Image (cartoon, rainbow, N blue to C red):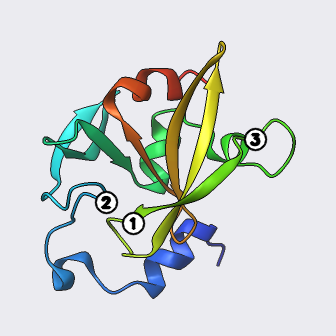
């Protein structure tokens, strides 16, 4: 059997339903499902931000391996972010850059999820 890193974390993490609804890592509002780039993601209406779980990021063509690589082309880590909505583990904040414009994005190492603001989302899917 072959499992990806994100799938291992999913298998280890308790079921989300047992923990209750997913919470926004920025403002703690309850996340709601929203269709973005033909993918169902968790969205915070209050913050206008999205959480892409690992498979959702892949489906939206977000190349997390390239974006968060430790190589020179990867977005540098700038500190710790909010708690992952799925695993409740602190995410790592990164500074991504596209066409000279920098924007924050958080990466959940625990499950491979990506937290990004709505305004930055459009740039992220084109990196």
Secondary element at tag 1? loop
In the picture, which quadrant includes the C terminus? top right
Q: Could you say which is closer to the camera, residue 59 or residue 42?
A: 42
Label 1, label 3: how many angstroms apart (C-alpha)? 21 Å
What residue is pinned by disc 2? Answer: 25
**Residue located 17% across and 54% down the image:** 31
**Residue located 47% across and 71% down the image:** 90
What residue is pinned by disc 1? Answer: 84
Image disc number at residue 56:
none
Question: Are dots 1 and 2 in contact, CB under 8 Å?
Answer: yes
Q: Is residue 50 above or below residue 17?
A: above
In the picture, which quadrant includes the N terminus? bottom right
Q: Could you say which is closer to the camera, residue 77 or residue 21?
A: 77
Q: Residue furthest top?
A: 99
What residue is pinned by disc 3? Answer: 74
Counting from the top left corner in percent of width and height, residue 69 is at: 76, 49
């Amino acid at each position: 059997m072959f499992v990806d890193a994100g799938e291992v974390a999913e298998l280890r993490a308790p079921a989300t339903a047992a923990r209750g609804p997913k919470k926004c890592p920025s403002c703690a509002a309850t996340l709601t499902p929203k269709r973005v780039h033909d993918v169902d993601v968790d969205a915070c209406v209050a913050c206008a931000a999205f959480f892409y779980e690992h498979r959702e990021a892949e489906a939206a063509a977000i190349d997390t391996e390239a974006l968060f690589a430790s190589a020179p082309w990867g977005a540098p880590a700038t500190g710790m972010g909010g708690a992952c909505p799925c695993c409740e583990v602190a995410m790592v904040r990164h500074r991504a850059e596209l066409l000279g414009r920098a924007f924050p994005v958080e990466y959940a190492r625990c499950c491979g999820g990506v937290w990004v603001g709505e305004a930055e989302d459009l740039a992220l899917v084109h990196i």
